[in-house]
Structures are given as structure tokens and as C-alpha cells.
Image (cartoon, rainbow, N blue to C red):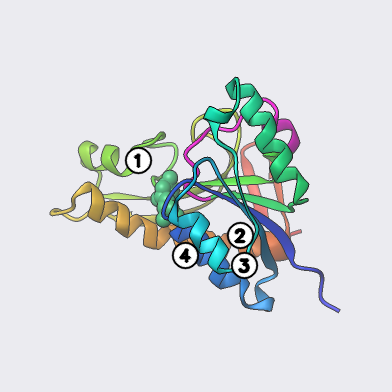
Amino acid sequence: MSAAPARLVVLVSGAGTNLQALLDACADPAYGAQVVAVGADRDDIEGLARAERAGVPTFVVRVKDYTSREHWDGALTDKVSAFEPDLVVLAGFMKLVGASYLPALGRITVNTHPALSPSFPGMHGPRDALEYGVKVTGCTLFVVDDGVDTGAIVAQTTVPVEDDDTVESLHERIKVGERAMLVETVGRMAREGWTVDGRRVRLGG
Ligand code: GRF
């Protein structure tokens, strides 16, 4: 008997193409994971529509519905925890998680960032890489911590910067690599487990 698939909760804020890549991968039982819920910090986004089309339960936790950011963080923690995830994937989730979330779920939460950490943290990784003039950028999957894109690195993929790139064309090329990195790495985490030793993350036993 094979082990039960790992339970994934995915949080999104936008188009959800990374989520879609995970949903597609999870259709194969050999992948070893299933998306048990998709959460968002806003309504009316394609990421939620993708989950609904796949028959996956969704929830929305909006900052403006809470009296403080701390209350929002607590509500998000409760919502995610209720699905008993083995792994939470922040896939284009444009909020920082905080003081309730991190002790409860930080250890099992990864985030994807469209730059090669530690370069270009924050909301504008592709733009900042282009403006700096780097010839190679990429994407980073990391375990969330209380910083901005500072957590221990699980995987990275490099992407070339072309002379005629715009922010949009570069970001689209990064997202192709990002989806492949996410599917490959989340699948390995689900099937093989992982350990975190300081800043060193190792996949497998
Ligand atoms: C990704 O590049 C993610 O790293 C960034 O926003 C993008 C989300 O894309 N924060 P999508 O919603 O998965 O299509």
C-alpha cells in the first residue's frame, strides 16, 4: 500500500498559474500530493476560479474584514489549520504572514519568489533584476520566516535575461521556470519529506 497523498493547502492572490501547475501535477496519483484547499486574501481572482473548476474547496480571508492585521493573521492561521495540511504553498500570495501564523504553520509553509534570493527581495523581483542589469535571474522556493523573502532556500532555478526583455517578458520567462521548480520540489517534499538545519534544507529522509 502506498502512503496517503500529502495534503496541500495553496494560498494565492492572482492569476494562479503556479496553483494550476500543482493541480495538474496532483491529478497523477504517483505525484503523492493532493490540493485539499485553496485560500486567498481577495475575491474574484482567477486563482480561486481555477480551484473551483478543479472541485477544490476555497476560502477567502480579507485584511479589510478584520480590525487589525494581527486578527487577520489569526483568522488565516485558523482557516489553513482546519484543513490539516502537510505542506502549505504560498503561490503568488501577496501578503506577509505573521505572529500567529509562523509558530503554527511556518515550519510547513513554502513560498515562491520570482528572483534568485538573496537578490531582489520584495514585490518587484523581475523589475529590480532588470533595472540592475543582471544577465541571469530566476526563482526561489523557500521556507517562510518573519522576513521578506529571507527564509531557508529549498530550491532555485536560473533564467537568462535577454537584451530586449521588458518586466513582463522577463516575469513570464521566470514563471515558466517557477512552475517547473514548484511542481518538481513540492512533489519531492510530499514523497520524500525534508529537513531544515539552520539555513540548510535537504529533501529526503
Ligand atoms: C509568481 O511569479 C510569484 O512568484 C509572484 O507572483 C507570481 C504569481 O503568479 N509573487 P501566478 O498567480 O501563480 O500566475
Q: Residue at x 38, y 62 (%)?
A: 176
Q: Quadrant of residue 172?
A: bottom left
Q: Secondary structure at mark 4?
A: helix
Give above or below for 13 relative to 103.
Answer: below
For the residues labelled 2 and 4, the Cα–Cα distance comes to 10 Å
| Label 1: few (<14), some (14–19) or many (≥20) C-alpha neighbours in 10 Å | many
Choose the circle earlier in sequence order: 2 or 4: 4
Q: Label 2 amino acid? A: Val
Query: Which of the two residues, 93 or 202, is positioned nearer the viewer here?
Result: 93
> Residue 92 location, x and y as percent?
47, 47
Query: Which of the two residues, 200 or 192, is positioned nearer the viewer here?
Result: 192
| Residue farthest to the left, as pictured | 164
Q: Secondary structure at mark 2?
A: helix
Q: Label 1 amino acid? A: Gly
- The residue indicated by pointer 2 is 186
Choose the circle earlier in sequence order: 2 or 3: 3
- The residue indicated by pointer 3 is 55
Question: Depth-wise, is mark 3 or mark 4 nearer the camera?
Answer: 3
- The residue indicated by pointer 4 is 180
Q: Label 3 amino acid? A: Gly
- The residue indicated by pointer 1 is 125
Choose the circle earlier in sequence order: 3 or 1: 3
- The span shown in magenta is 91-104
For the residues labelled 2 and 3, the Cα–Cα distance comes to 21 Å
Choose the circle earlier in sequence order: 1 or 4: 1
Res. 49 mark: none
For the residues labelled 3 and 1, the Cα–Cα distance comes to 32 Å
Question: Depth-wise, is mark 3 or mark 1 nearer the camera?
Answer: 3
**Marks 2 and 4: CB-CB under 8 Å?**
no
> Residue 178 location, x and y as percent?
44, 57
